[in-house]
Image: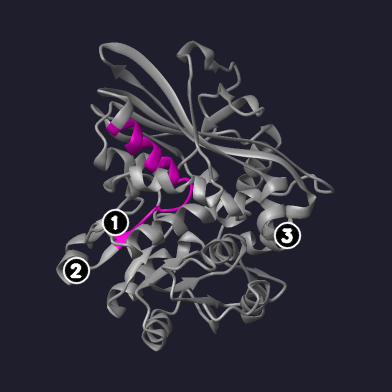
Amino acid sequence: MKVLLLGVGGVGEGIALVAQNKPWLEQMVLADYNLQRAQEVYQKLGRSPQFVVAHGDASDVRGIIKLAAQYQVDLILNAVSCEFSDPIFDAAYQAGCHYMDMALSGVGAEMGSYQFERSHLWERKGLLALIGMGMDPGVSDIFARYAAQHLFDEIDEIGVRDGAALEVEGHEFAPTFSIYDALEECTDPALIWERDRGWYQVEAFSEPEYFPFPEGIGPMEVVHVEHEEVVLIPRWIACNKVTFKYGLGEQFIQVIRVLKMLGLHSRQPVNVKGVSVAPIDVVAALLPDPASLGPKMSGKTCVGTWVTGWKDGQRRSVYLYQVMDNQEAMSKYGIQAVSLQTAIGPVIGLELLAQGIWQGTGVLGPEAFDPDPFLARMPAYDFPYGAVDVEERAVISSART
């Protein structure tokens, strides 16, 4: 398989490092707007002949098509901010390539609508666009499909629950993933889906509860945040409700609220002493690059899917999860835990597509595929998963609103 990787930030670097030396990968083009960054990753890969470096502008549809044709790629993998998802998606279609991304464009129940509305066109061309194939969304959705396929006869609720016990030395506030995506997710209203009601919005950070995370992380307050799983999961898995809650921490929530109140989350340029600048770009410039935080980070991050329902007539509650330790991520790949955790899922997905184990046409989410071969490959990627029974009464509602 030949892959055009657009974006070699922390996650893109992780994708390249994890995919290196895999026999199914013929070539990967490391394309980034910052050519120097792409060169740095290429050096870290030992200038392997499996990789080449190119300048790539995620907003330039014609340029992406030209790159795809130049290197005769089979698939374009989008590893940049979701604001560029639509042009990269269009470029892949016009270039006659398969497509994969890790986040959906749009907001609320309209997330992914641009892609889904064009599914019939991709089917007609015999092409696949696998959207939301990261960690969350991505692996979290695959956990949901596995639970539906093997662990439950009937599902009540599927709730993605993410939390982390991470510390970043020397920084009072240092998001471990893109501040652009964080602000988009956390300043929009959160989304819930119910069978009898469809999709509806609730206030971001609402309905806090304490969830008992495994492997030493412990109970953590989680709150509603807008996320793609709530749009993807109900399209393929029968259940009564889908939610997403994140353990962000009080400080993170307060900072996001202040940034929103001041309008600093806006992507619309404003005039500052004769210079046109987007407020969010100023925020991003003042914060450390998440890819640089690894040496200063310690602790673990957990992404998982909590499923409740019935099996053999008995009520059941299971949490399927993946925990990444930052020290292990740094020792194995030299990148921080959140970036590595996000990167491995897409690489396993690439392998399954390259080997013809996952097949399809049109626009599909991870839930549309057999989860078994994916989970079977996770240990070989040093990406173990776990499953624990969670008593529903152990999830404690918080009094904070």
Q: Residue at x 39, y 79 (%)?
A: 61
Q: Earlier in the sequence, mark 2 or mark 1?
A: 2
Q: Kindly identify which residue carries mark 3.
A: 292
State the residue in front, 32 or 22: 22
Residue, x 27% and y 47% (percent of image)? 368
Asked which secondary structure carries label 3, the reply is helix
The amino acid type found where label 1 is placed reads Ile
Q: Indicate which disc residue 357 carries.
A: 1
Q: Earlier in the sequence, mark 1 or mark 3?
A: 3
Q: In which quarter of the image is the N terminus?
A: bottom left
Describe the colour scheme in one phrase.
Answer: one colour
* CB contact under 8 Å: marks 2 and 3: no
Would you say residue 135 sits in the magenta stretch?
Answer: yes
Residue 49's spot in the image, x, y percent? 55, 81
At label 3, counting other C-alpha atoms closer than 10 Å, the crowd grade (few under 14, some 14-19, many 20 or more) is some
The stretch of residues the image draws in magenta is 129-149
* Label 2 sits on residue: 126
What amino acid does circle 3 point to? Ser
Q: Give SS at disc 2.
A: loop
Where is residue 225 drawn, in percent x and y? 50, 38
Q: Which residue corresponds to the image point at 62% horizontal and 45% vertical from the top-left?
A: 261
Mark nearest the camera among 2 and 1 is: 1
- Residue 40, quarter of the rendered image: bottom right
Comes first in the chain, label 2 or label 3: 2
Q: How crowded is mark 1: few (under 14 residues within 10 Å), some or many (20 or more)?
A: some
Asked whether disc 1 touches disc 3, contact meaning CB atoms under 8 Å apart, the reply is no
Between 127 and 372, the one nearer to me in the picture: 372
